[in-house]
Image (cartoon, grey):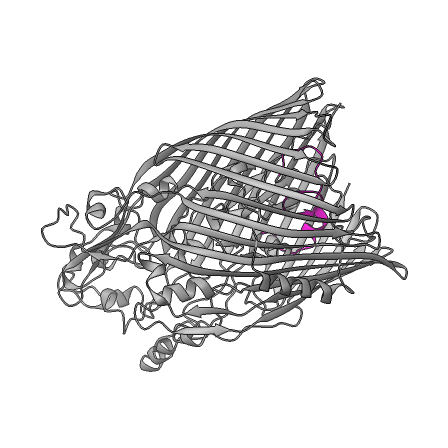
């Protein structure tokens, strides 16, 4: 009987110019003496045991016998031991340390992005990477982030429930549909019998950010028919603060010595955050040819972050006396000013149920249904709606965002024997239907009201983050239907080719047809050349297509209330100002790579990529509403989402590894390196025409990122050392006019961990991330707000993190 494990899908990669190729080859040769391995045997102690090149994979292929070495596109495989060797319980941080081209930012004091952090693969948008769990599409977050990007929130997937991670670095829309432009990340949940319990503590050397976590998993054998794995975890981290007292707060204290002003008045750092996750993973044989499978994930998180301090001597829109409220003064409520507290409460749910099986020896089939939902409730405390005066509450419910997705899939794979070929042709085909619904629920009326005090200059809405109004609320849906065919054919014993095409129809904008051609030639059993060309797309979401946001304020000169809005591109007013229906972002990807292994324990790959993306998504500039244009909500200015600009991304991925016996133990070393450059080619507005925005877009992330790690294991002990390198990048002040740029140089961090197997089932691990307590250059242009290190940094700026973990396996 063939293997029961049904393969899952993944994504592809790209190619690059000869100059970058020379750099890549040079890097590999330089590294050859110290290169690392995906070790063939697990080292002793609690060392990270990498997946080997012979590990069977399910991402990027629908064949049942592909390994990491013989795929037609590069696929990285990370074992459970490698994943657990990283201290963080946030999957974003885990991937940032494992995948060289994966970058995630902290984004302190940046609204919803503090909690749903933007993560990028190969420098592309967070919603241009497809995320799968057990081969099924994982739903998006409800947050529309920077430039309107709406990607999945990887932090909602519990790290300790993962058996392995497969990352396909190639364009794969022809195989999997929308979003697979940068690649595919496939999270494989643990389905093994047995269990484990882990306890962890961590804290920064500055004495803050205390983290506590506990997680457990147990896999039950269902007779000889399958298994049921249950898991749960909890973690809580206290806030960090890398802040100095603001200059205006110092001046305010000197001017009012009778008051005690908090120092600092606002906190730049990670938020207070608590997470809980529960779930299951089921595999059950109903008979000799049919399996029932499914999984469920539920996550709940609560967090609070600071906003900017409101200075009583400098915030006239809150502290000015008003004739509308005689005798009332906001100083009686907040005599030393106030820093609003922004709250985020998330509920996240994903469930999949399916059947798979065989017809004879050559047919495999799989049908499944899935449901995903992300729901975010926002609150604001320690604030005021000044226009309501003494009637204003100090805490507000701002409203809710929600994203809901339903999917139905049917996949069939046929192994076609051809006598003239070295092996059967693998033919896969299938269909999918999907529905996405985006929702906005209004907040408390007081959170968005423009009260009577507005006519005297007092600001309306919850100060810091006005709530969603009833005019913004609603539900919007989009449906799609798709069909695909995917063929892999071994033309000779050494040469394999693949071709895929996918047709997809969306209710909002119409059709998309994409294709992919790939090939792999094996010079020897240990050396192969691979490459692909493909087209891809990312469909606009209902949240991007239909939602709008409205903010109101008061012009301090004219004392007139003004209303600004981000409108739906289909809104009549937006259309009159130039908005056009959104269409999919389109991509063209080319890649070329070399992969190798040998009996001495060396293995690795070099892959070049070139990704052209057209009609990229962004928010337009603000347009004043001309007199005489129908404007029922009296907007002063409006903007809208638009297909704004085109880009080209070129780069190279280098992965090299080596494992060897050394003395009484085993030494395993791994190098991962990525060079990535994106440039804006053309466009009509925004990023394409604004030189400041263009520079930030092209330089905001490091072009180079690398990780070199070595593990030495002997007896009951192992030591893991890791060097993380980030190239130079650029930040800006974010001023409306006169933007100030600052170039931050390259940074490197050393991590160290020591593990002791107390018994065969119990392991104690202690370690330090950023062992030498390194900090980047200070963000000089933000000093006036008390910030020390840039909030846009592509790495943690909180210093050394010390941790200990105790794990019991049974």
Single out the residue that lies furthest toward the bottom: 254
User: Does residue 600 appear to the left or right of 54 in the view shown?
Assistant: right
**Residue 439 position by quadrant:** top left
Rendered location of residue 310, percent (x, y): 32, 67
Compare residues 765 and 98 and report the one nearer the observer: 98
- Give how far across and how far down residue 242 sits, in percent: 50, 70
Check the picture and name the quadrant holding the N terminus: top right
Residue 99 relative to residue 731: left or right: right
Q: Is residue 74 visible?
A: no
What predominant SS class does the magenta segment belong to?
loop
* Image coords of residue 388 (percent x, y): 21, 56
Q: Can residue 341 be seen by looking at this rendering?
A: yes
Residue that sits furthest to the left in the current view: 628
Residue in the foreground of this view, choosing between 191 and 448: 191
The magenta stretch spans residue 76: yes
What's drawn in magenta, residue-wise? 61-90
Residue at 52% x, 48% y is 589
Nearest to the observer: residue 142 or residue 671: 671
Judged from this view, the residue extending furthest toward the right is 664
Which residue: 54% across, 64% down? 703
In the image, residue 432 above or below residue 571: above
């Amino acid at each position: 009987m063939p293997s029961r494990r049904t393969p899952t899908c993944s994504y592809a990669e790209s190619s690059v110019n000869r100059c970058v190729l020379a750099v890549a080859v040079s890097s590999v040769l330089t590294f050859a003496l110290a290169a690392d391995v995906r070790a063939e045997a697990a080292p002793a102690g609690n060392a990270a045991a990498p997946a080997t090149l012979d590990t069977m994979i399910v991402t990027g292929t629908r064949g049942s016998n592909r390994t990491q070495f013989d795929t037609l596109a590069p696929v990285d495989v990370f074992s459970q031991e490698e994943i657990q060797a990283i201290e963080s319980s946030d999957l974003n941080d885990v991937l940032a340390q494992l995948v060289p081209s994966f970058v995630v930012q902290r984004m302190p004091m940046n609204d919803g992005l503090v909690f749903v952090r933007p993560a990028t693969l190969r420098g592309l948008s967070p919603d241009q990477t497809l995320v799968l769990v057990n081969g099924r599409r994982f739903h998006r977050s409800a947050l529309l982030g920077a430039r309107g990007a709406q990607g999945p929130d990887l932090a909602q997937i519990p790290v300790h429930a993962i058996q392995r991670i497969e990352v396909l670095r190639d364009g794969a829309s022809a195989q999997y549909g929308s979003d697979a432009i940068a690649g595919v990340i496939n999270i494989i949940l643990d389905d093994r019998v047995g269990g484990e319990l882990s306890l962890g503590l961590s804290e920064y050397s500055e004495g803050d950010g205390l983290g506590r976590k506990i997680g457990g998993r147990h896999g039950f054998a269902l007779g000889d028919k399958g298994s049921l794995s249950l898991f749960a975890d909890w973690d809580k981290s206290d806030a960090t603060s890398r802040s100095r007292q603001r200059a205006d707060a110092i001046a305010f204290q000197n001017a009012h010595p009778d008051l005690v002003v908090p120092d600092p008045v606002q906190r730049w750092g990670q938020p207070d955050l608590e997470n809980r996750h529960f779930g299951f993973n089921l595999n059950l044989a109903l008979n000799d040819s049919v399996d029932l499978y499914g999984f469920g994930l539920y996550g709940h998180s609560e967090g609070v972050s600071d906003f900017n301090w409101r200075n009583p001597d400098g915030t006239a829109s809150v502290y000015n006396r008003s004739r509308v409220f005689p005798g009332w003064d906001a100083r009686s409520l907040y005599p030393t000013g106030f820093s609003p507290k922004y709250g985020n409460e998330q509920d996240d749910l994903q469930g999949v149920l399916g059947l798979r099986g065989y017809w004879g020896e050559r047919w495999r089939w799989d049908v499944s249904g899935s449901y995903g939902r992300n729901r975010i409730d926002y609150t604001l405390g320690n604030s005021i709606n000044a226009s309501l005066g003494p009637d204003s509450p100090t805490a507000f419910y701002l409203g809710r965002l929600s994203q809901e997705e339903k999917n139905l899939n049917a996949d069939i794979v046929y192994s076609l024997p051809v006598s003239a070929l070295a092996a059967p042709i693998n033919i896969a085909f299938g269909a999918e239907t999907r529905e996405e619904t985006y929702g906005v629920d209004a907040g408390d009326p007081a959170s968005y009201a423009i009260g009577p005090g507005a006519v005297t200059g007092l600001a309306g809405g919850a100060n810091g983050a006005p709530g969603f109004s009833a005019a913004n609320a609603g539900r919007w849906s989009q449906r799609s239907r798709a069909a695909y065919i995917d063929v892999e054919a071994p033309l000779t014993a050494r040469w394999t080719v693949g071709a895929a095409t996918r047709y997809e129809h969306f209710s909002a904008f119409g059709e998309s047809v994409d294709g992919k051609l790939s090939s792999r030639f094996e010079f020897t059993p240990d050396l192969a050349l691979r490459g692909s060309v493909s087209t891809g797309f990312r469909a606009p979401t209902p949240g991007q297509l239909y939602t709008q946001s409205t903010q109101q304020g008061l012009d301090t000169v004219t004392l007139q209330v003004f209303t600004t809005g981000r409108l739906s591109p289909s809104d009549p007013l937006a259309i009159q100002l130039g908005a056009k229906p959104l269409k999919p972002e389109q991509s063209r990807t080319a890649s070329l790579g070399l992969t190798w292994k040998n009996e001495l324990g060396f293995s690795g790959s070099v892959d070049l990529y070139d990704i052209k993306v057209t009609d990229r998504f962004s928010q337009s500039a603000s347009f004043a509403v001309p007199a005489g244009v129908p404007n029922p909500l009296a907007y002063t200015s409006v903007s809208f989402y638009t297909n704004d600009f085109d880009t080209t991304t070129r780069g190279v991925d280098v992965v090299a590894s080596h494992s060897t016996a050394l003395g009484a133990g085993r030494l395993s070393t791994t190098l991962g390196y990525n060079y990535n450059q994106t440039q804006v080619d053309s466009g009509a507005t925004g990023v394409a025409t604004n030189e400041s925005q263009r520079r930030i877009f092209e330089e905001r992330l490091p072009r180079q990122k690398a990780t070199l790690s070595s593990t030495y294991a002997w007896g009951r002990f192992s030591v893991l050392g890791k060097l993380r390198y980030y190239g130079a990048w650029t930040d800006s002040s974010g001023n409306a006019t006169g933007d100030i740029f600052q170039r931050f140089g390259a940074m490197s961090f050393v991590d160290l961990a020591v593990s002791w197997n107390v018994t065969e089932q119990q392991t104690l691990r202690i370690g330090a991330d950023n062992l030498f307590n390194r900090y980047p250059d200070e963000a000089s242009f933000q000093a006036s707000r008390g910030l020390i290190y840039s909030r846009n940094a592509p790495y943690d700026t909180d210093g050394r993190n010390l941790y200990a973990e105790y794990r019991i396996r049974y």
